[in-house]
Image: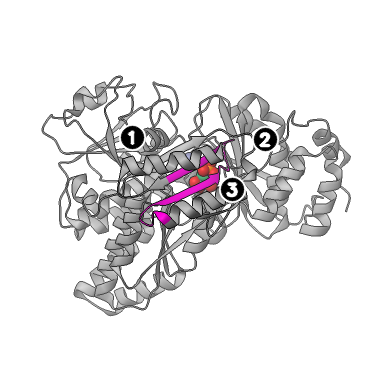
Amino acid sequence: MTIDENIICKIQNWKPSQLFSYGTAGFRARANLLPPVVFRCGILAAARALSVPCVCVGLMITASHNPSEDNGVKIIEPDGSMLDEKWERIASKLINSENPREILQELCFEENVCWTTDSKSIRPAVYVGYDSRESSEPLSRLVEQAVKLIGLKYKCFGRVTTPQLHYFVKVANEDGIQANKENYFQRLSMGWDILSQYAFADNSEIFRVVDCANGVGHEAMQDLTHFTKIDNIVCVNTGNGELNKHCGADFIQKNTVFPIISDPFHIKSIPSNALVHFCSLDGDADRLVYFIPEKTEYSSLSGSSNQRVRVLEGDRLSVLAAIVVKKFLDLLQSNLSVGVIQTAYANGASTQFLKDLGKPIQVECVSTGVKHLERAARRYDIGIFWEANGHGTILFSENAKSFLRKIIESTTGQKKNAALCLLALSSIGNQATGDAICNFVLAESLLKVMGWQDLVSWESLYQDLPNCYKALHVQNKELIQTTDQERKVTAPHSLSVVMKNLSESNPSYRFLVRPSGTENIVRLYGEGPSLPTLKCLMEQIETVVL
Ligand code: 16G
Ligand code: ZN
């Protein structure tokens, strides 16, 4: 099948100035390097939409928690999940290719992409969204050019969070409804209202301070306050300061200090004796972590601060979701399977706590990267997954939802209420991907359901094992290879021997060494009962890695 020469010419003449590879976060770089990458990605998104019967695919422009001068682009599958691995490879090939004609032609034969416009057939659309970076909107115009060049429909949602775009794509394809912000927030509002009826704590006096990382999450939080009855939401870092700088979920989780707040007047209005829940979104609002400041006079914690915080990471969200799901399922005596998926970064104390919950909770460990967790979670009737960095969600299978609907129709009392609450959780948790806005509503409703007012009750469920994390700069990170969900090193030999010996002689300690998939570094993580001993053992590993 021939491809319009015009299209080939345009693509051929506009080639990125360096090699790119489609990683877990799509393509990411300094924004000024991205125009040809984004244009070619527009072509690729169109090709993906033409390769399967669908209403649309998605394309998001964001670099998440990276500095404001960076940007990135990633494609969303018709079912709302992340790009298929085979297409990730096609993406890298097309972006770097000197001869795009060959690749586009290959797509005709191997992926059934029909490039020519047939006026009778309904052409799919590419749904586009972008974050709050200065470079984002101009980059979206390049996608528009590319998509229209191929003759597909282009639908731009403007500034949205990454998970909102995932949701829009999923809903448009699977539910056949017009995806928009209204139905996204209505689902959250409905879930919140139902769970509030069965909650053991009122929590209406609580102030909820949300650090929006000076990113697009602030706009979503504003919409949330408009659409739901959640009281006392106080947004900070709403855009006056620099995106992700000394604030946001990634910064808080890695540095365990209170964020710098660029608009302190918001926080100063909170009464000094009020109970406060603090949390942080990242730059595109797909990650959320809660934190507890060590100092209680938070109104003085505004400007610059080295004030330490205790972070309630993704593991804690998993645990909170798991205990509530178990509590309701126990009332239903169901056979539904429940999986909690973690990575090797999950604190061992959380894993033990989850295992001790017993049936029906099953705990699984998979490799780093949301797509691995999500895939594993979808194998259960109810799949709960979180990475320690705050990315995760709770997924309900169709089987689980229809089981719950049947119970609601056929029973009364406690059983019916339990089923109603579980169904409400499925409407709060973003069913396409991890979502900080939904997870904020989820955490706040689960705390109410448990009857907990302060975050300390949640934190006290278990005590994290002392742990330590390091980023090591090495010449060639790819020399390090791992197996067993990254828990064992297989190469280089010297490192694998040291790790094996250390683990055998210190069975209560655990170490993790892996090359980063997003940065040119090797990540080292360890945990065990004594921090000084742990640090000492990790130094031994570090000397072999470097
Ligand atoms: C990306 C992944 C995240 C993973 C992280 C690992 C998505 C949306 N995000 O941010 O899941 O934890 O990479 O980074 O897929 P690393 O390989 O540098 O440790
Ligand atoms: Zn993000």
* Numbered mark located on residue 494 in the image: 3
Q: CA distance from mark 3 to mark 2?
A: 42 Å
| Closer to the eye: label 2 or 1 | 1
N-terminal of the two: label 2 or label 1?
2
Q: Is mark 1 within 8 Å of ligand 1?
A: no
Q: Is mark 2 within 8 Å of ligand 2?
A: no
* Numbered mark located on residue 256 in the image: 1
Residue 67 appearing in the image: yes
Packing grade of label 1 (10 A; few <14, some 14-19, many >=20) is some
Residue for point 54% across, 61% down = 174
Residue under pointer 2: 38
Residue for point 73% across, 35% down = 19
**Magenta stretch bounds:** 505-525
Residue for point 84% across, 37% down = 98
Packing grade of label 3 (10 A; few <14, some 14-19, many >=20) is few
N-terminal of the two: label 3 or label 2?
2
Q: CA distance from mark 2 to mark 1?
A: 35 Å
Quadrant hosting residue 340 = bottom left
Where in the figure is residue 355, as x and y percent of width and height? 33, 65
Assign a secondary structure to mark 1. loop
**As drawn, is 253 to the left or to the right of 432?**
left
Q: CA distance from mark 1 to mark 3?
A: 33 Å
